[in-house]
Image (cartoon, rainbow, N blue to C red):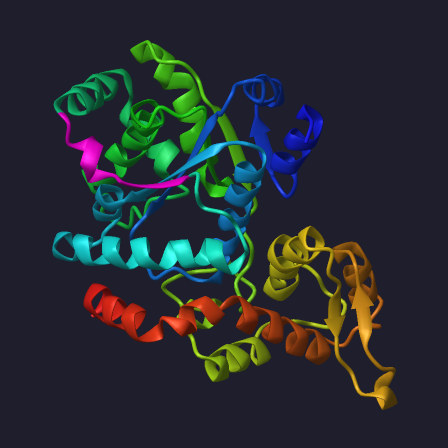
Amino acid sequence: MNEQERFDLIARNTEEIIQDEELIALLRKKQPVVYLGTAITGRPHVGYFVWVLKLADFLQAGFKVKLLLADLHGALDGTAWDVLDHRFQYYAHIIPLMFEAVGADINNVELVRGSDFQLQKKYFFDLLKLSTLTSVHDATKAASEVVKMGSSPKMAGILYPLMQTLDEEYLDVDVQYGGIDQRKILVYAREFLPKLGYRNRVEVMTPLIPGLIGKKMSASDPRSKIDLLDDEETTNKKIKDAYCEAGIIEDNGLLAFLKYVIMTIKQDNNNAFIVERPEKFGGNLTYNTYEELEKDFVEKKLHPLDLKTAVAREINNLLRPFRREQKKLQELSTTAYS
């Protein structure tokens, strides 16, 4: 794979890269390092496959991946301190299965627990130093799309983006990757790390996909997402009840999941997406690209119910590794989210 092919692989399905030229230069390094941080808050759901697949792209492009299981960030965003370890254990068990589900090799994936390095004396000194350089307005603005501030904001929400900025340096990475909702924090990091004498990192962002009810996928609203531990019956029912108006692509979580997850996996494995239909309704439909499918849906050649049935089949296939370890994962989940 040449340099352009590696860049194209990383860039696919992204919303923004800051900056392209810096990413291209990184590709000349022997093994650049990317990290994604996930705060251990709500239960992981199928929306997490968007970033799992993007990290798989980084792996294929020759990167080492550091996956930060941010326990302290979870506490800053409202997770009770006494369940942090239990939630860490749940995430640490379930996320490797997500890579397995998409067929990714995780030899170059390192799981890092935030509190293992964020409580170091030097890190804390830098956090204090950064706080003297950052206005309350700038910290609040950076955190606004990510942290649940509420009607009575806590100081924790202001610390959150400062710590995420320092994580780039202390994890010794070249790229930070996150959802587009992280943009204000990533831009803040670009501006403020040099003020501490540290280098800028490349920032890569992917879109957020709508939930099943036509809004942002949310771990707190069970109707909006498929939990990784949902059984087949529950999965099928949630998809059957999902918002999917004929011909309308806006806020359609099923189409978004198809585009960024299912069709990406299919194309990487040279497989087509098949919508099974009785012969009396025209027989099966076969799609090699998402664009073909979207066109048929917009033109109402693909019925929402047929689409739902096909998507349910694919999601149930993705969830097989979790169902194989259902008992262990359910025990961990019960302890973490009781």
Q: Is residue 113 magenta?
A: yes
Q: Quadrant of residue 25?
A: top right
Q: Which residues are magenta?
A: 109-120
- Quadrant of the rendering where the C terminus is positioned: bottom left
Is 180 situated above or below 323?
above
Would residue 174 be counted in the magenta stretch? no
In the shown orientation, is residue 120 left or right of residue 73? left
Q: Nearer the viewer, residue 101 or 51?
A: 101
> Residue 29 location, x and y as percent?
53, 18
Image position, residue 180 (x, y; %): 51, 40
Q: Relative to 48, say whether 274 is above or below.
A: below
Instruction: Please name the residue shown 62% across and 66% down the image.
Output: 254
Residue at the (52%, 82%) spot, across then down: 237
Is any part of residue 251 visible from this angle? no
**What residue is shown at x 58% (from left), y 29% (from top)?**
17
Q: Quadrant of the N terminus?
A: top right
Direction from residue 259 to residue 284 in the image, left or right: right
Q: Nearer the viewer, residue 207 or 20?
A: 20
Note whether residue 290 is visible: yes
User: Where does the image place residue 18, in percent across and percent down from the top left?
Assistant: 55, 25
Residue plotted at (53% across, 33% down): 204
Q: Residue extending furthest bottom?
A: 280
- Image: 239 above or below 50: below
> For residue 334, which quarter of the picture?
bottom left
Name the quadrant containing residue 286. Answer: bottom right
Q: How many marks?
A: 0
Residue 78: image x %, image y %? 23, 51
